[in-house]
Image (cartoon, rainbow, N blue to C red):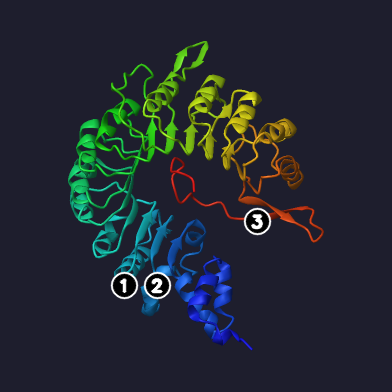
């Protein structure tokens, strides 16, 4: 007879890989065998977010737990700091000390993420991480701090948020060091970044696969298209639009490998009585189509939730990319008409994930439109598109959509609700509900969806 203690430890670790959160902690209390099998998974990620910060120091931080039990440090692979406790409007120095000590003790960290401007006290510990491959930080650093951070020479995926001019001036030097490693470069809200510096940095990265330059005031879509001549292998591209009249480089840069495109639109009114022009979006689609890329995902974000994507743009997207699109995201905007949604769902024969505003009041018409897709598996609601709160998605509404769209397996709604298709004992449709707390997103909105 097989007992828990006789199950191979490797098998237990594979089983526990499907669990997360409090389930892991509960499993660790079952038996010594379960404890040994769950520990690598339980301490693989040190996550600290707002809910933890509110209870600190009454509840011990995961970094203090590592300091108290050094034998656990070997299991840590990922560090994700999304919030920092405060003391009298200042970051808690005790917490930062715990973080630094834990980082120094963990030899196998492969990814580090810190959303807050607290990286400087941790730079010394990061320099010792020989296996660090993924880095995302708030990069508002001084010159001395920037000189230290660019010593990290094994980064494969680099994300710099709110980077200062001190670090941007050193970016070409850093990318030169990372030339053989770096595959994804993301610069978000780097207001001091200019075309000259970015061009020098990209010249060092001919093998780059992902480039995401969003919210950088001095580098718009026209500048990006002039610079991607340095990166012919790009598979993912995110950019912010500028003035529609800005000329694009000719002949068009080769983007034949492009699979994921995200556009952050910054639209300006044509006149006091006319809506903002979307000609920049149309120009971008026309420009990339010259390379005949096979887009798998397309993401667009508008600056105003009350704006709609014109039917002409939807038709342009369908004409060029309908056969290959699997993921579509329309953030802070709506489609011009229901006919546009119907046409998209009918034409995109491989569509699996749709991120869009779900009009609860017109759910029947919406369901008919998305039922034109026989491959749609995941529907993500991105919130109401008016300033007044609307009705929330309920279980009955989800049932209507799943009955109308047989392929639909999951509906992700607001307030951390995830509805999934299930079957009751008689084989009839049942709707399961999972609630997850709303946390700061682990990735930027423009990054390719899994």
Quarter of the rendering containing residue 220: top left
Q: Which residue was labeled with disc 2?
A: 75
Q: Is residue 64 above or below residue 87?
A: below
- Of residues 256 and 339, which is closer to you in this image? 256
Q: Percent position (x, y) of residue 110?
A: 34, 62
Q: Which residue is drawn at 31% across and 57% down?
A: 133
Judging from the image, what secondary structure is the residue with disc 3 in? strand
Please give left or right for residue 139 compared with residue 172 in the image. Answer: right
Q: Is residue 123 visible?
A: yes
> Mark 3 or mark 1: which comes first in sequence?
1
Pick whichever of labels 2 and 1 is earlier in the sequence.
2
The residue sitting at 41% across, 33% down in the picture is: 293
Q: Residue 246 carries which label?
A: none
Q: In this view, does 25 lie above or below 335?
A: below
Which residue, given by chain and number where applicable, does mark 1 sit on? 105
Q: From the top left corner, tell me how far across and down residue 326 is, in percent.
A: 53, 40
Considering depth in this image, is 227 or 273 the residue closer to the camera? 227
Query: Helix, strand, or loop for circle 2?
Result: helix
Label 3 or label 2, whichever comes before in sequence order: 2
Q: How crowded is mark 1: few (under 14 residues within 10 Å), some or many (20 or more)?
A: many
Q: Is residue 386 visible?
A: no
Q: Is residue 281 left or right of residue 126?
A: right
Work out whether 314 lies above or below 168.
above
Between 314 and 320, the one lying in front of the other is 320
Please report the residue visible at 55 percent of the width from the left and 21 percent of the height from the top. 310
Between disc 3 and disc 1, the foreground one is 3
- The alpha-carbon separation of the residues under discs 3 and 1 comes to 36 Å
Q: Quadrant of residue 123?
A: bottom left
Q: In which quarter of the image is residue 75?
A: bottom left
Q: Name the residue under label 3.
A: 434
- Judging depth in this view, the residue of 229 and 278 nearest the camera is 229
- Crowding near the residue tagged with mark 3, few <14, some 14–19, many ≥20 C-alpha atoms within 10 Å: few
């Amino acid at each position: 007879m097989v007992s828990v203690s006789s199950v191979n430890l490797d098998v237990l670790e594979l089983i526990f890989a499907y669990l997360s959160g409090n389930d892991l902690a509960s499993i660790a209390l079952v038996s010594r065998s379960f404890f040994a099998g769950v520990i690598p998974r339980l301490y693989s990620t040190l996550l600290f977010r707002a809910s933890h910060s509110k209870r600190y120091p009454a509840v011990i931080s995961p970094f203090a737990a590592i300091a108290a039990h050094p034998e656990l440090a070997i299991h840590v692979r990922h560090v994700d700091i999304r919030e920092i406790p405060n003391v009298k409007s200042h970051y808690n120095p005790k917490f930062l000390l715990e973080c630094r000590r834990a980082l120094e003790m963990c030899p196998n960290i492969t990814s580090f993420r810190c959303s807050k401007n607290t990286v400087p006290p941790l730079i010394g510990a990061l320099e010792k991480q020989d296996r660090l491959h993924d880095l995302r930080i708030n990069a508002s650093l001084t010159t001395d701090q920037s000189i230290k951070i660019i010593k990290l020479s094994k980064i494969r995926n680099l994300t710099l948020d709110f980077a200062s001019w001190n670090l941007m001036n050193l970016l070409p030097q850093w990318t030169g060091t990372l030339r053989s490693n770096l595959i994804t470069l993301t610069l978000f809200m780097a207001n001091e970044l200019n075309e000259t510096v970015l061009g020098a940095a990209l010249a060092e990265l001919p093998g780059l696969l992902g480039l995401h330059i969003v919210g950088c005031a001095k580098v718009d879509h026209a500048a990006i298209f002039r610079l991607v001549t340095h990166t012919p292998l790009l598979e993912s591209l995110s950019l912010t639009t500028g003035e529609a009249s800005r000329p694009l480089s000719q002949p068009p840069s080769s983007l034949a490998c492009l699979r994921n495109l995200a556009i952050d639109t910054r639209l300006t009114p044509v006149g006091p009585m006319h809506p903002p022009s979307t000609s920049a979006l149309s120009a971008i689609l026309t420009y990339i189509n010259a390379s005949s890329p096979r887009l798998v995902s397309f993401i667009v974000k508008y600056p105003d939730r009350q704006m709609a994507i014109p039917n002409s743009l939807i038709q342009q997207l369908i004409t060029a990319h309908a056969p290959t699109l699997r993921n579509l995201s329309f953030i802070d905007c709506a489609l011009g008409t229901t006919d546009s949604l119907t046409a998209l769902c009918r034409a995109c024969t491989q569509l699996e994930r749709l991120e869009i505003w779900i009009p609860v009041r017109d759910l029947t018409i919406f369901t008919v439109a998305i039922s034109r897709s026989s491959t749609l598996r995941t529907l993500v609601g991105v919130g109401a598109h008016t300033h007044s709160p609307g009705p929330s998605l309920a279980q009955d509404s989800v049932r209507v959509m799943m009955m109308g769209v047989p392929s639909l397996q999951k509906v992700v709604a607001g307030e951390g609700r995830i509805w999934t298709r299930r079957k009751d004992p008689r084989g009839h449709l049942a709707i399961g509900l999972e609630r997850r707390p709303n946390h700061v997103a682990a990735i930027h909105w423009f990054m390719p969806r899994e």
